[in-house]
Amino acid sequence: MKSQKLSSTPVVTGQCLCGAVQFQMEYPAFWAWHDHSRASRLAHGAVYATYVGTWRKRFRITAGEREINRFEEKETSAVRSFCRRCGTPLIYERARSRHMINIPRALFQRRTGRQPIYHIAIEEMQDWAHAGESLVPLKGYPGVFCKRSKKKSRVHEPRLSASTTSDCS
Ligand SMILES: [Zn+2]
């Protein structure tokens, strides 16, 4: 049910990869952050997850509610929802903040009104995360860039050392 108040409120829309699940959030979000925790890393299959958080009442699913599956983490009682068709992580609800809802930033097509200036579980940040190092084009592979090593880096995995220290210019 749409109230007049809601219809005049600016919203940002988002969706999962397959498009079955669509949602909207009132603009702006409350906050945004990068989450380096192991649980979010595994849930996203990515080095870290970037979320925007908002009040639950400022977020709604507009299509595909039946396609949403929920997974509750036993240790933390956090609930993670995802599209059962395409697997996209959709909503992360933390047990400690029941009135807030967190959505992966990547699912919104437009700006959410908050930049992710915060980091959670930064001590768990992986050493393979890209941290803004300068990159150079990889010769012979258009669109592929490579981190240039200034000197031979002390790579612990011998098999990788050749490819990480050469062919980058
Ligand atoms: Zn989907």
Image (cartoon, rainbow, N blue to C red):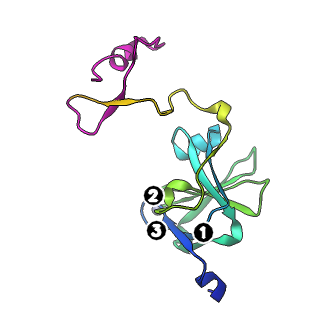
Residue occupying image coordinates x 63% and y 62%: 29
Q: State the extent of the magenta-drawn residues as a range.
A: 140-169
Which part of the image, by quadrant, shows the N terminus? bottom right
Amino acid at dot 1: Tyr
Task: Give the spatial CA distance, label 2 vs label 1.
Answer: 26 Å
- Kindly state the secondary structure of the residue where label 2 is placed: loop
- Nearer the observer, 51 or 28: 28
| Secondary structure predominantly adopted by residues drawn in magenta | loop
Tell which circle, 2 or 1, labels the residue nearer the N-terminal end: 1
* Residue highlighted by disc 1: 27
Label 1, residues with CA under 10 Å away: few <14, some 14-19, many ≥20: some
Asked if residue 157 lies in the magenta stretch, the reply is yes
Asked if residue 85 lies in the magenta stretch, the reply is no
- Kindly state the secondary structure of the residue where label 1 is placed: loop
Task: Give the spatial CA distance, label 1 vs label 3.
Answer: 22 Å
From what the image shows, is residue 71 above or below residue 165?
Answer: below
Which mark is drawn over residue 38?
A: none
Amino acid at dot 2: Cys
Label 3, residues with CA under 10 Å away: few <14, some 14-19, many ≥20: some
From what the image shows, is residue 41 above or below residue 107?
Answer: above
Task: Give the spatial CA distance, label 2 vs label 3.
Answer: 9 Å
Check mark 3 vs ligand 1: CB closer than 8 Å? yes or no.
yes
Closest to the camera, between mark 2 and mark 1, is 1
Q: Is residue 111 left or right of residue 134?
A: right
Quarter of image, res 10: bottom right
Check mark 2 vs ligand 1: CB closer than 8 Å? yes or no.
yes
Quarter of image, res 161: top left
- The x, y position of residue 52, in whole percent, is 61, 56
* Residue highlighted by disc 3: 20
Say if mark 2 contacts mark 3, CB within 8 Å: yes
